[in-house]
Image (spheres, rainbow, N blue to C red):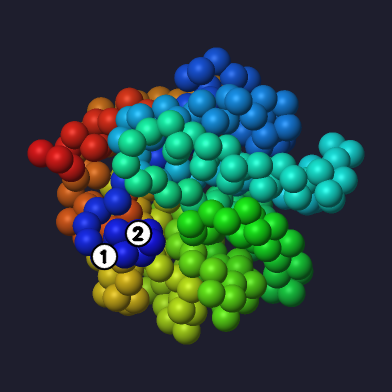
């Protein structure tokens, strides 16, 4: 069954944060490449993280390619051929993990924003000072390489503004490659300050988009975004926010807790077709989410 067909039939559960699962397993991610570094140094750890989410009940695994790019790996002295191999391996690792569990599972190839490659928090601001053509040039080789590895869908995620969204849509439009588009938001606007009504509308002429929504945001921002996305596009909605904890940049630690995450997600599922978690949501939280949806 195609993922789009499954979403049309009911709610499909996504996994949680790749970095969270890796950190729970004891891996140090204090590196510009973040979780993508383990594609190079410890691919078995990436596979194990995917398997943990599948075993928790996730039906879709999002690959560890969020921060993987040709330019990012080039700064480590890694050539284009090896980078392409690492990108394709991110899909293969998720597919391999799916073979260890029963039931149908899907693989979403993560296409993170340009700002993630800078490793300076730019993905939460957007407006990088690049032209649309420059953003297309950045995204095209990664999108094409990831798709060559045969994922079920591209997860174009944590996009901070419509400018970058339109650049990725330029790459995908007319290709027949299914994708979802999810923005990072604060309140009723993108991280770049654009109204959600406007940014969701950019998918209107792109048949490849199977869902649109938000991720890597506060849980309390999800319900309105889901409603706006459905109203503007008529498409299924994808929603996978953070746990509800807050990052303290000065103390370099997380504060609060995510105890209400699963219950909140149960409410989002009333309007969303794809539901999961992002930062600070590990396999345990996804298992709670599954139980909430089943009840």
x and y percentages locating residue 243 in the rendered image: 36, 35
Q: Which residue is mark 1?
A: 8
Q: Residue at x 42, y 49 (%)?
A: 106
x and y percentages locating residue 85 in the rendered image: 74, 45
x and y percentages locating residue 289 in the rendered image: 25, 37
User: As drawn, which residue projects farthest toward the top?
Assistant: 26
User: Disc number at residue 124?
Assistant: none
Residue 118 visible in image: no
Q: Residues within 10 Å of mark 2 (few under 14, many from 20)?
A: few
Q: Height in image: 83 above or below 226? A: above
Position of the C terminus, as image quadrant, is top left
206 displayed left or right of 33: left
- Residue 38, quarter of the rendered image: top right
Q: Secondary structure at mark 2?
A: loop
233 displayed left or right of 96: left
Mark 2 vs mark 1, foreground winner is 2
Q: Residue at x 30, y 59 (%)?
A: 6
Q: Nearer the viewer, residue 218 or 62?
A: 62
Q: Residues within 10 Å of mark 1 (few under 14, many from 20)?
A: few
Q: Nearer the viewer, residue 91 or 166?
A: 91
Position of the N terminus, as image quadrant, is bottom left
Q: Nearer the viewer, residue 188 or 136?
A: 136
Q: Which residue is mark 2?
A: 1
Q: Secondary structure at mark 1?
A: helix
Residue 81 visible in image: yes
174 displayed left or right of 239: right
């Amino acid at each position: 069954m195609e993922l789009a067909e499954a979403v049309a039939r009911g709610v499909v559960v996504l996994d949680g944060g790749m970095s969270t699962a890796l950190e729970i397993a004891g891996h140090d991610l204090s590196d510009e490449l973040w979780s993508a570094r383990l594609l190079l140094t410890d691919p078995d750890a990436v596979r194990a993280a995917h398997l943990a989410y599948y075993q928790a009940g996730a039906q879709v695994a999002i690959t560890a390619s969020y921060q993987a790019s040709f330019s990012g790996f080039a700064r480590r002295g890694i050539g284009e051929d090896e980078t392409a191999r690492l990108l394709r391996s991110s899909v293969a690792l998720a597919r391999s993990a799916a073979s260890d569990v029963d039931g149908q599972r899907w693989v979403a190839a993560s296409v993170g924003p340009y700002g993630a490659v800078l490793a300076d928090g730019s993905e939460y601001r957007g407006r990088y000072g690049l032209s649309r053509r420059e953003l297309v040039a950045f995204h095209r080789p990664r999108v094409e390489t990831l798709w060559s590895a045969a994922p079920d869908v591209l997860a174009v995620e944590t996009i901070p503004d419509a400018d970058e969204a339109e650049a990725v849509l330029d790459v995908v439009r007319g290709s027949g490659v299914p994708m979802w588009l999810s923005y990072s938001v604060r309140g009723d606007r993108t991280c770049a300050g654009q109204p959600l009504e406007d940014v969701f509308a950019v998918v209107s002429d792109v048949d490849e988009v199977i869902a649109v929504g938000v991720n890597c945001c506060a849980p309390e921002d999800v319900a309105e975004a889901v409603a706006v996305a459905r109203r503007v596009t008529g498409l299924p909605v994808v929603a996978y926010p953070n746990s509800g904890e807050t990052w303290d940049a000065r103390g370099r630690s997380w504060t609060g807790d995510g105890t209400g995450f699963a219950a909140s997600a149960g409410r989002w599922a009333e309007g969303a077709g794809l539901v999961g978690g992002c930062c600070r949501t590990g396999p345990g939280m996804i298992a709670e989410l599954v139980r909430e949806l089943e009840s």
